[in-house]
Amino acid sequence: MWYHDYVNLTLRIPDELASHFASADEMERRAIEALALDEFRLGHLTRPALKSLLGFATRGELDTFLVSHGVKGRYTDSDLDHDRADLQRLGL
C-alpha cells in the first residue's frame, strides 16, 4: 500500500457504481484521491502533503495528477526559486 497509517472506513455505494471499478483496490484508491483532492482544493493540504499522501515520487507526477483533475497550477515565487536551484545544480 502507498500509505502507512490509516483509519478504516466502511463506504456503502450502490452496486451500479461499484460495477464501474475493476477492483476493490481501484475503488479504494479513487476514493482516497477524491477526498485528498477535495482537501487540497479547500486549502487543508499543501502540495507536499498531497504528494506524500498519494505516494507520488516526484512533483511532476503530482502536477500531472492535478492537471488531469482540472486543478490549475499554483506556481509561486518559491517554486521558481526551487526550479532555479535545480537547474543550477544540473549545470544548466
Image (cartoon, grey):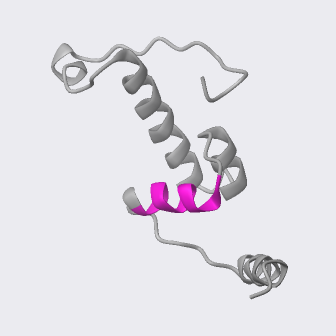
In percent of the image, x 53 and y 14: which residue is there? 9
* Residue 49 as seen in the image, left or right of residue 28: right
Front residue of 16/3: it is 3
Q: Is 19 displayed left or right of 60 in the figure?
A: left
Residue stretch rendered in magenta on the structure? 58-67
Percent position (x, y) of residue 78? 77, 78
In this image, 27 relative to 66: left or right? left
Tell me where residue 10 appears, x and y as whole percent. 47, 11
Q: Is residue 59 magenta?
A: yes
> Going by the image, does 33 lie left or right of 90?
left
Quarter in which the C terminus is drawn: bottom right
Q: Residue furthest bottom?
A: 92
Which of the pair 39/83 is nearer the observer?
A: 83
Up-down: is 83 above or below 21? below
Q: Residue at x 61, y 46 (%)?
A: 56
40, 62: nearer the viewer: 62
As for residue 27 lying within the magenta part, the answer is no
> In this view, which residue lies farthest toward the front?
91
Placement of the N terminus among the 4 image quadrants? top right
Q: Is residue 32 above or below residue 40?
A: above
State which quadrant residue 19 falls in: top left
Task: Tell me: residue 33, above or below residue 87.
Answer: above
Name the residue located 71 percent from the left edge and 54 percent from the top edge.
Answer: 48
